[in-house]
Image (cartoon, grey):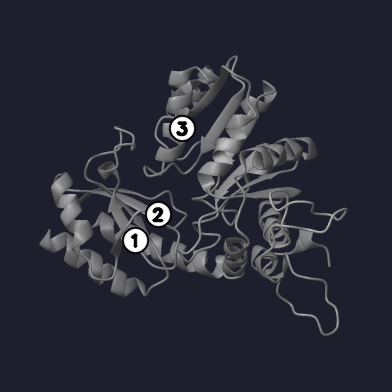
């Protein structure tokens, strides 16, 4: 059966498996090797590992990519993507996105490494107006933490007409909701740490593409910078991917239900939920201190950075200096997990009420 006809649930379980051989195990073993016998497919531990390839194959299958490269973190993957651009290249990116990406681009801009044009990625006219003469478009949709939605097919289509490169952070939506390569993106980035691995126990990133030449350049960047994945983390992430569709579907259902309940709560002034995904951001009636009290006032929900695990977490995002000043001080980002939704709502309601 061709994998092109398989559903995501099946791809997550079946991709990256060893060949079906009598008496052999069905799971990929962990390869704890840094040194390899000469003249084989892997010559050195920085250029390859037997545990990377199955995970890369699984992510490629989910994203309809021809190849994927693992990195030591999502930021390592993002840095590798931008490293391919020539000095001073004009880049268009969201002014309100993942703080790590924005911090990197702001530093590159101040140093003259890149010319970064920050835009409201949800304002299609503004984005297109800034594409003139640019070399690269970086898209994040939904944005983190505001959950803004870009007209991705329109802005990517315009960028490709201008022969621009396009990178896409698909961490929040995941390939269950959108596949950016089908819109024309050249690179899809995942913080594998989040939904793909899904258990808050690894830090990994990935870049997927359909372009063999681009893959080779990204691979050279990974080798040169040494931003390689650990074999144990790769094995854990592959095990996590086996249940990714099940986990994400449940979390997404919970998020939709909680967004509706939050919209009717007297202590909540604004709810941001794009209708898909497992992140809900909301603003409360109080100030930053009140938002902190909410986050500290739960018994089930954990006040923590990062997201995408089976457990529900939340935090006030502006507690971080790197966060965009356009994010309200009293905004709470809720990463919804797989717990019973009634238990989660009881916890949220209690925290909001006593804050």
Tell which tag, 2 or 3, sits nearer the viewer.
3
Left or right, 18 with reference to 277 = right
Q: Within 10 angstroms of label 2, few (less than 14), some, or many (20 or more) residues? A: few
**Looking at the image, can residue 198 be seen?**
yes
Q: Secondary structure at mark 2?
A: loop
Residue situated in front as seen by the camera: 10 or 275: 10
Q: Residue at x 40, y 39 (%)?
A: 99
Q: In whole angstroms, how far apart are the C-alphas of marks 1 and 2? A: 8 Å
The residue where tag 1 is placed is 313
Q: Contact (CB < 8 A) between labels 1 and 2?
A: yes
Q: Within 10 angstroms of label 3, few (less than 14), some, or many (20 or more) residues? A: some
Q: Residue at x 63, y 21 (%)?
A: 86
Residue 73 drawn above or below residue 12:
above
On the image, the x and y values in percent for residue 27 come to: 70, 74
Could you tell me which quadrant the C terminus lies in? Answer: bottom left
Hey, which quadrant is residue 98 in on the image?
A: top left
Q: Within 10 angstroms of label 1, few (less than 14), some, or many (20 or more) residues? A: many
Q: In whole angstroms, how far apart are the C-alphas of marks 1 and 3? A: 25 Å
Residue situated in front as seen by the camera: 49 or 101: 49
Q: Earlier in the sequence, mark 1 or mark 2?
A: 2
The residue where tag 3 is placed is 104
Tell which tag, 1 or 2, sits nearer the viewer.
2
Q: Secondary structure at mark 3?
A: helix
Q: In whole angstroms, how far apart are the C-alphas of marks 2 and 3? A: 18 Å
Q: Earlier in the sequence, mark 2 or mark 3?
A: 3
The residue where tag 2 is placed is 306
Residue 60 drawn above or below residue 226:
below
Furthest-top residue in view?
Answer: 133
Please give the label number shown on residue 60. Answer: none
Q: Secondary structure at mark 1?
A: strand
């Amino acid at each position: 059966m061709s994998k092109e006809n398989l559903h995501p649930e099946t791809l997550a379980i079946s991709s990256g498996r060893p060949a079906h051989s009598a008496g052999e195990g069905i799971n990929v073993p962990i390869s704890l090797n840094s040194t390899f016998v000469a003249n084989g497919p892997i010559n050195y531990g920085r250029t390859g590992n037997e545990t990377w390839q199955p995970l890369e194959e699984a992510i490629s299958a989910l994203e309809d990519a021809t190849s994927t490269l693992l990195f030591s973190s999502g930021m390592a993957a993002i840095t590798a993507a931008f490293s391919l651009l020539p000095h001073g290249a004009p880049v268009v990116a969201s002014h309100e996105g993942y703080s790590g990406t924005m911090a990197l681009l702001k530093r590159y801009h101040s140093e003259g490494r890149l010319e970064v044009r920050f835009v409201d990625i949800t304002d299609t006219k503004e984005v297109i107006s800034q594409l003139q003469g640019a070399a690269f478009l970086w898209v994040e949709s939904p944005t983190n933490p505001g959950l803004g939605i870009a007209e991705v097919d329109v802005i990517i289509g315009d960028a490709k007409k201008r022969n621009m490169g396009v990178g896409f952070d698909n961490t929040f939506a995941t390939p269950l909701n959108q596949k950016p390569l089908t819109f024309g993106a050249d690179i899809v980035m995942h913080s594998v740490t989040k939904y793909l691995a899904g258990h808050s126990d690894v830090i990994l990133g990935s870049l997927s593409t359909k372009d063999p030449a681009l893959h080779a350049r990204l691979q050279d960047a990974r080798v040169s910078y040494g931003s390689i994945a650990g074999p144990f983390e790769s094995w854990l992430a592959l095990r996590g991917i086996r249940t990714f569709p099940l986990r994400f579907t449940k979390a997404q259902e919970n998020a939709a239900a909680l967004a509706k309940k939050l919209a009717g709560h007297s202590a909540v002034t604004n709810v941001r939920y794009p209708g898909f995904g497992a992140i809900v951001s909301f603003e409360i009636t109080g100030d930053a201190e009140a938002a902190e009290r909410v986050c500290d006032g739960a018994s089930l929900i954990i006040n923590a950075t990062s997201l995408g695990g089976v457990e529900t977490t939340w935090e006030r995002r502006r507690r971080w200096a790197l966060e965009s000043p356009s994010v309200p001080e009293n905004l709470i980002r809720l990463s919804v997990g797989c717990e019973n939704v009634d238990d989660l709502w009881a916890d949220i309601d209690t925290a909001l009420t006593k804050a």
